Image (cartoon, helix red, strand yellow):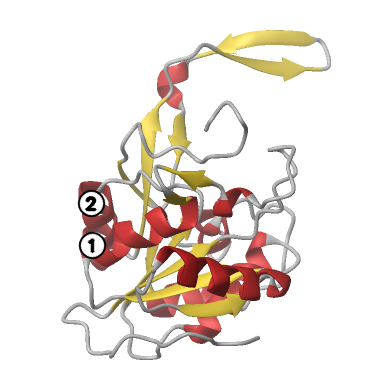
Amino acid sequence: MSSINISPPWGSRKGLAVIIVAGGKGLRMGGDIPKQFLVVRGRPILMHTIERFHHFDPTMQIVVVLPSDQHDYWNQLCQQYGFDIPITIADGGKERFHSVKNGLVCVHTDCTLIGVHDGVRPYVSTEVIQRCYDAAATDGAAIPVVPVFETLRHITPDGSHTVPRQDYKLVQTPQVFQAPLLRRAYEQPFSPSFTDDASVVEAIGHSITLVEGNRENIKITTKEDL
């Protein structure tokens, strides 16, 4: 694992950190450029995402997890776009679980709350970030969710049937946790059942608090999303 760029002076009034996971290969976009580097509104998506958290709290530590073969390209983009928000870069892993685990190594030990956010969610609102960190400070673990408006059907070997959509929520990021809890959760071996950070924390028996997300906070994955 490597740490490059300059970390911000630590000593945040709240002891906050965020791990931004940006390990996309761009395959579902159908192009050669990883989706986190595609330009939207004049800048790569990843830069917009980083700016959201920097604007929320300029003193928070921002760790960006990138595949090792993308580090040089990222540094070139920073020069090209004059992007100078201080970050720490960690190497991406085989699965998201391993990427977050690598990012955790770079988070300062005196941090109290750690968020994990998708690098291709550039439109998370400041209010949602605030709600997640506030709830995690009280309850230990918090994730943003939004209602399901579409009709859902459950597929079975015998066919399918409609399920009550009010019983389901769409999960977003940042998913925020008290630092000792998240570090302990990531001491577990990897399991294919770990679909997000909340599922990793739930596996050690801790409950998750749901807070209101914002509808615009989509994960840019396909050309249609762009």
Give the mark nearer the N terminus: 1 vs 2. 1
Residue type pointed to by label 1: His
- Near mark 2 (Cα within 10 A), the count class, few <14, some 14-19 or many ≥20, is some
- On the rendered structure, is 19 left or right of 54? right
Q: Is residue 112 left or right of residue 64?
A: left
Look at discs 1 and 2 and give the one toward the viewer: 1
Dot 1 surroundings within 10 Å: few (below 14), some, or many (20 or more)? few
Name the residue at 48% across, 57% down. Answer: 46
- Name the disc covering residue 55, or none: 1
Which residue occupies 72% across, 17% down?
155
Residue at the limit of the structure toward the right, as seen here: 157
Circle 2 sits in a helix, a strand or a loop, which is it? helix
Question: In the rendering, at what x and y percent does residue 198 appear?
Answer: 50, 55
Q: Nearer the viewer, residue 144 or 157?
A: 144
Helix, strand, or loop for circle 1? helix
- Would residue 30 be visible to someone looking at this image? yes
- Give yes or no for contact between labels 1 and 2 (Cβ–Cβ under 8 Å): yes
| Residue at horizontal 82 percent and vertical 10 percent from the top | 158
Q: Which residue is nearer to you in this view: 69 or 137?
A: 69
Residue 126 percent coordinates (x, y): 23, 51
Q: CA distance from mark 1 to mark 2?
A: 8 Å
Query: Could you say which disc has been placed on residue 126 in the image?
Result: 2
Image position of 125 with respect to 170: above or below: below
